[in-house]
Amino acid sequence: MTLAILAAVLYVAAAALQARAVFRDRADATVPGALLALAGVTLHAADHVRALLATGAVELHFFAALSLVALGVALLTAALSFARPVGALGVVLYPIAALLALLYAATRSHEAAGAALGWQIQLHAGLALLAYATLSVAALLAIMLWLQERALRRRQVSPLLRAFPPLTLLEALMFRLIAAGFALLTLALLSGAVFVENLFAQHLVHKTVLSLLAWGVFGALLIGRLRHGWRGRRAVRLTLSAMALLGLAFFGSKFVLELVLARA
């Protein structure tokens, strides 16, 4: 629990530094916050590694999976902060990562419940979590893009919105992340098709169908972008719709199976 608490403190401190830089309109001052966030990511990852060494398997229960996604999102956000003026992302995402790190530590299993999972399934799960983390950041950028476009149309730009990156940069970064997440999701689905056996017995049919639907929407968006120049509100709607399907596929099903029906 100590590592999770320290990681949460660093995440919150990083968010505070990012918020200070953002509201003072100093994009160049977000580096200290990103460095603190990377320190938090290191401790957050160490907490998962310690659990791995103790149980002999990667934990993939509901809160563990959420924590792993938060870890990936925080790492990606901190890395982006060194290259792009996206400090506003950290203000939102780092506190969420702190909360999920603490929830994982509080609900962590001390038994080797996942020891039966082979490396093939763990590879599939890892790809799926990386895809979800990448596409989650893209979805947040889509929300930022929508808020910024709406404010510009209404000529009501708040100090927070002024701290957002320019529209063109937001949109370009969003599509790059969608492309990367789409590639990871493709690999996750292919590895699942190869390695996962007996979908019906493992209650994975609905998860697979929803994941394929999300994959199709993301793919259509990328093709529409390349061939027809899709952007703006259409891109935002499709991104958020696909992310909702993906969220239902993974965390919706895990929530019902593990927390409602109490099945591993």
Image (spheres, rainbow, N blue to C red):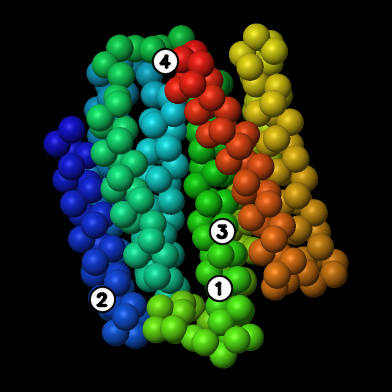
Question: Which residue is denoted by mark 3 in the rendering?
Answer: 138
- The label nearer to you, 3 versus 2, is 2
User: What's the CA distance linking mark 4 and mark 1?
Assistant: 41 Å
Secondary structure of residue under mark 2: helix
* Disc 1 to disc 2: CB gap under 8 Å: no
Classed neighbour count for the residue bearing mark 2: other residues with Cα under 10 Å, few (<14), some (14–19), many (≥20): some
- The label nearer to you, 1 versus 2, is 1
Q: Amino acid at mark 3?
A: Ala
Q: Amino acid at mark 1?
A: Leu
Mark seen at residue 114: 4
Q: Earlier in the sequence, mark 4 or mark 1?
A: 4
User: What's the CA distance linking mark 3 and mark 1?
Assistant: 14 Å
* Disc 4 to disc 1: CB gap under 8 Å: no
Question: Which residue is denoted by mark 2 in the rendering?
Answer: 20
> Can you say whether 95 is above or below 52 in the image?
below
Question: Which residue is denoted by mark 1 in the rendering?
Answer: 147
